[in-house]
């Protein structure tokens, strides 16, 4: 094993400083982060195929390139000695404590002794707590990005907002309304629609770019996208506390007399004011024919 991989294993075994406000959800956040770290360690120790089969739920979804059952995909996957290395740098959960999200950088190497990575990128994982209290991945998608020039930051824990004084049905109806307005806005100006629906903590993921963090950075990134977009939902779910939800599916974006197609993942979270805002938006282009 290379020195760099040995160092990475050592770093994974040591919990870095985690910043989070005093919130009852913090233990759940830490549990989700530790599950992600354990997943990463298992991948280095036992390989990509075995670790993904162990940590993926039976109904897990990946983009390959269309939404596909993750367990089925990795049952046929061949590692070929490659090593996938990653770490979480952001996590959030629902107030009900059964749905969580993690993101962070990854890199792929040809072998355990290879020093130079083949590729770099970012992952987004959605976790669901199981009846036995373990955590399993239900959605796992990602993007490619250029080689990083700085070290990955310490993990940020983002607790959910305190529950608004509305019942679950009202929250669900509010999300339906927000999504309808969002879809209408996408059809007029995609970049502005996402910016207008963004939370202050939004993370935007686009292929071949580093993700943006925060509404200001996201708005700058999206300012050039004035396309007319349609998104078709393939699946998704909402937390039991009706304050964290995700949708995934296909998109088509008409811009500058060209049409870009691909797949998307959008994660919505209820804010302190009781409004649904996008905390994460990922688009992955379909391969050119």
Image: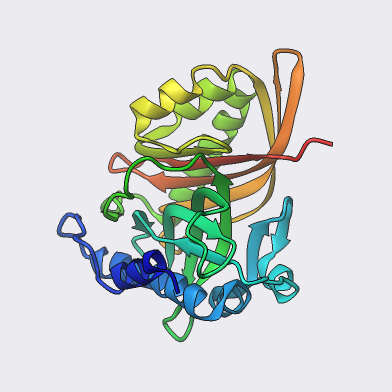
Q: Nearer the viewer, residue 183 or 267?
A: 267
| Residue drawn at 55 percent across, 29 percent down | 181
Identify the residue at horizontal 49%, vertical 49% (top origin). 122
- The quarter in which the N terminus is drawn is bottom left
Residue nearest the observer in this picture, 171 or 21: 21
Give the left or right position of residue 253, taking residue 102 as reference.
right
Vertical order, 49 against 104 (above or below): below
Q: Position of residue 55 (x, y in %)?
A: 53, 75
Q: Position of residue 44 (x, y in %)?
A: 48, 74
Is residue 36 visible in this depiction of the protein? yes
Q: Tell which of 47 and 118 is nearer to you.
A: 118
Q: How many marks?
A: 0
Q: Residue at 30%, 72% (x, y): give it.
A: 10
Image location of residue 269, percent across then percent down: 41, 47
Q: Residue furthest right?
A: 289
Hey, which residue is sitting farthest bottom in the picture? 132
For the C terminus, the quadrant is: top right
211 over 234 or under it: above or below: above
Let me know if residue 159 appears in the view. no
Q: Could you say where residue 283 lies in the image, as x and y percent from the top left?
A: 60, 39
Q: Residue at x 43, y 74 (%)?
A: 41
Placement of 235 over or under 55, stated as above or below: above
Horizontally, residue 232 falls left or right of residue 31, namely: right
> Can you name the residue that lies furthest to the left here?
22
Colouring chosen for the image of the structure: rainbow
Does 123 sit left or right of 212 as displayed?
right
Q: Is residue 115 left or right of residue 119?
A: left
């Amino acid at each position: 094993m290379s020195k760099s991989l040995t160092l990475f294993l050592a770093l994974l075994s040591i919990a870095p400083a985690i910043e989070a406000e005093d919130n009852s959800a913090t233990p759940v956040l830490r549990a989700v982060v530790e599950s992600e770290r354990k997943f990463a360690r298992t991948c280095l120790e036992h390989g990509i195929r075995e670790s993904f089969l162990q940590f993926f739920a039976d109904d897990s979804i990946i983009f390959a390139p269309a939404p596909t059952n993750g367990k089925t995909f990795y049952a046929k996957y061949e590692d070929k000695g490659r090593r996938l290395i990653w770490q979480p740098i952001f996590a959030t959960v629902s107030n009900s404590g059964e749905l969580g999200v993690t993101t962070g950088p990854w890199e792929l190497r040809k072998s355990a002794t290879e020093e130079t990575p083949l590729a770099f990128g970012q992952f987004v994982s959605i976790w669901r707590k199981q009846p036995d209290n373990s955590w399993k991945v239900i959605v796992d998608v990602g993007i490619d990005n250029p080689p990083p020039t700085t070290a990955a930051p310490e993990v940020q824990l983002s607790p959910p907002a305190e529950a608004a004084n509305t019942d679950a049905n009202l929250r669900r109806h509010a999300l339906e309304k927000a999504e309808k307005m969002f879809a209408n806005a996408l059809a007029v100006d995609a970049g502005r629609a996402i910016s207008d629906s963004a939370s202050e903590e939004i993370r935007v993921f686009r292929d071949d770019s580093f993700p943006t963090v925060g509404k200001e950075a996201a708005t700058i990134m999206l300012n050039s996208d004035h396309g007319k977009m349609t998104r078709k939902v393939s699946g998704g779910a909402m937390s039991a506390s009706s304050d964290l939800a995700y949708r995934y599916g296909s998109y088509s974006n008409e811009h500058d007399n060209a049409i870009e197609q691909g797949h998307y993942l959008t994660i919505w979270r209820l804010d302190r004011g009781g409004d649904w805002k996008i905390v994460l938006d990922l688009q992955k282009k379909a391969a050119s024919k």
